[in-house]
Image (cartoon, rainbow, N blue to C red):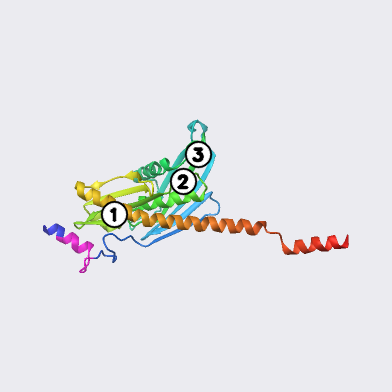
Amino acid sequence: MNETDSVEKEKLFDDKGLRLDGRQVDELRPLKLEVGSLSRADGSAYIEHGRNKILAAVYGPRELHPRHRAIADRALLRVTYRMGTFSVGERKRPAPSRREHEISMVIRQALEPMLFLEMYPRAAIDVFIQVLEADGGSRCASTTVASVALANAGIPMRGIVTGCAVGKAGGKLLVDLSDLEDKVGEADVPIAMAYGRSKYTLLQMDGKLSKEELAKVLEMAEGACEVIYEKQQKVLREGFLQIREEISESEEPDVDDIEADTESSDSD
């Protein structure tokens, strides 16, 4: 081990071998998911993954403008990923960056295989993702929350897409890289998958890993995605149950109306 590796390990791990935020190498950061965060959107969701705070909103299916962009046999999925000027330590320029355009495309490509876009020819489905605070793995967290927002909007899906960033830092293979681990680490592997279908919809790699390390990293990623997927399922189930309760309550006849009808019948 050379001197550079020693310095990096000192930055990334404490005396007990734990990561600086107290996690084990295969442990996820705290995760919070909510659905229905925006009342004016057709579907929406909010995620806090570590210090990442990301909001996703879905509009559609709806008529596509301009119409010449319409696709005859399926809907056009449009994804817009934006980072707030206040989302990172150094103020970001408000204009969309090349990186934001790239991540928008990556998330769209990760979501498309799981959507029944052929059910809505010549229509558009718009997904807007706003990063309120970024802390590493924002493209994966954005994919996770966008998938939940699409399900919340009632868009037919083959499966929920789950994202997680894995990689190598300080000589160790790690799950759910933080911003620091991503910046100083040896490799970063963002993935997205339809958990339960063993289908990867996103697989990128920045850095170098051996074949054995890559196989191990993907195995660790699948375990992490299982945990995230269970939370996605739980929050969606709770959201649908809440909607069903609200519908049931609105359909129940008002007691005062029943009494008034009864009195009217008696008097007749």
Foreground: disc 3 or disc 1: 1
Q: Quadrant of residue 25?
A: bottom left
- Residue for point 38% across, 56% down: 228
- Residue 74 place in picture, x, y as percent: 48, 35
- Residue for point 54% across, 49% down: 42
Q: Is residue 240 above or below residue 119?
A: below
- Residue for point 67% across, 56% down: 251
- Which comes sooner in the sequence, label 3 or label 1? 3
- Residue 8 is a magenta residue: yes
Q: Residues within 10 Å of mark 1 (few under 14, many from 20)?
A: many
- Secondary structure under the numbered disc 3 in the rendered image: strand
Which disc is residue 220 wearing?
1
Q: Report the magenta residues as a range.
A: 6-17
Q: Are marks 2 and 1 in contact (CB under 8 Å)?
A: no
- Calculate the distance from the C-alpha at mark 3 to the C-alpha at mark 1: 36 Å
The answer, for residue 208, to whether it is visible in the render is no
- Which comes sooner in the sequence, label 2 or label 1? 2
Q: Are marks 2 and 3 in contact (CB under 8 Å)?
A: no
Amino acid of disc 3: Ala
The answer, for residue 219, to whether it is visible in the render is yes
Pick the front one: 4 or 168: 168
Q: Residues within 10 Å of mark 2 (few under 14, many from 20)?
A: many
The residue wearing badge 2 is: 127
- Calculate the distance from the C-alpha at mark 2 to the C-alpha at mark 3: 10 Å
**204 to the left or right of 61:** left
- Residue for point 48% across, 55% down: 236
Q: Are marks 3 and 1 in contact (CB under 8 Å)?
A: no
